[in-house]
Amino acid sequence: FIGTLFFLMAAEYPHWVFFTLPIFCALISGPTLWFLAKKENLPNVLKFLGMSIVGLIYCGLMPSISYQIALAENGLVLFFLHLAVVFSGDISAYFAGRFFGNRKLHETLSPKKTLEGAVGGLFGSVLTGLAWAYFFELEVSLALLLVVFLMTAIFAQLGDLFKSFFKRLANVKDSGGIMPGHGGILDRIDGVIFSSAVFYMFVLGFFKP
């Protein structure tokens, strides 16, 4: 409930996040410490509290940035551009890893991901972004577009590893069962969530579709 409320606040009033984030963290921390903290379980309470606050930021604050992209001038074009860059990177990484993958990217966090797959994902994201930018005539230099799409792709892959970290901690294969074959909703949008701030920064500064 607190995470949903924070998402709504951050989406509608982004300039108030600086004030509201500490408030919502306190709303989580106060009751947690009051009702759960005992001498014998303080390390577990600290772990629970840390994960709760990370979850608040991950599932509350970060998705609200994607909402801000959609609200920008010609926001739907930019929003779907962001999705295209991330999703094409996922697809390219899958096929590059399947056909060329030999070296593990990070076996502890994600045993199936390979370095070759990661590189292929970066190429796929950048090429898709450039094609989209050409089709919609984005008035941005080629060099800047390369930087934007590459950084977005890198952060998207970091987001995938971050979500894998949570799944390893929870000892689950998928984040949910709503999207069979995709691992759950979080598995589909983890890269979008993690790269939204980077992409939005460039949207604010440079993109004039």
Image (spheres, rainbow, N blue to C red):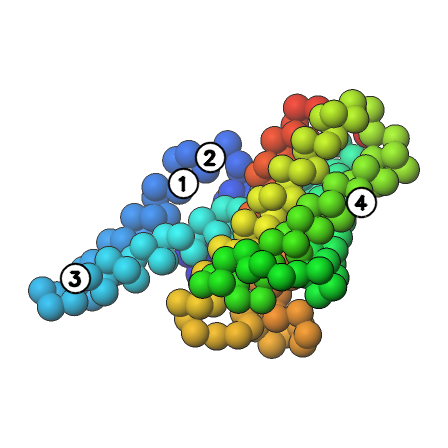
The residue where tag 3 is placed is: 42
**How many angstroms separate mark 1 from mark 2 (CA)?**
6 Å
Q: Amino acid at mark 3?
A: Leu
Q: Is residue 35 found left or right of 12 in the rendered image?
A: left
Residue 145 found in image quarter: top right
SS class of the residue under badge 3? helix
**How many angstroms separate mark 3 from mark 1 (CA)?**
27 Å
Comes first in the chain, label 4 or label 1: 1
* Residue sitting nearer the eye, 162 or 16: 162
Which residue is rendered at x = 42% and y = 71% of the image? 170
* Residue sitting nearer the eye, 77 or 138: 138
Residue sitting at the far right: 135
Which numbered tag is attached to residue 20? 1
**How many angstroms separate mark 4 from mark 2 (CA)?**
35 Å
Front label number (2 vs 3): 3
Few, some or many C-alpha atoms within 10 Å of disc 1 (few <14, some 14-19, many ≥20)?
some
Which numbered tag is attached to residue 192? none
- The answer to whether residue 89 is visible is no
Which residue is rendered at x = 70% and y = 38% of the image? 149
The residue where tag 2 is placed is: 16
Q: Amino acid at mark 2?
A: Trp
Few, some or many C-alpha atoms within 10 Å of disc 4 (few <14, some 14-19, many ≥20)?
some
Which numbered tag is attached to residue 128? 4
Comes first in the chain, label 3 or label 1: 1
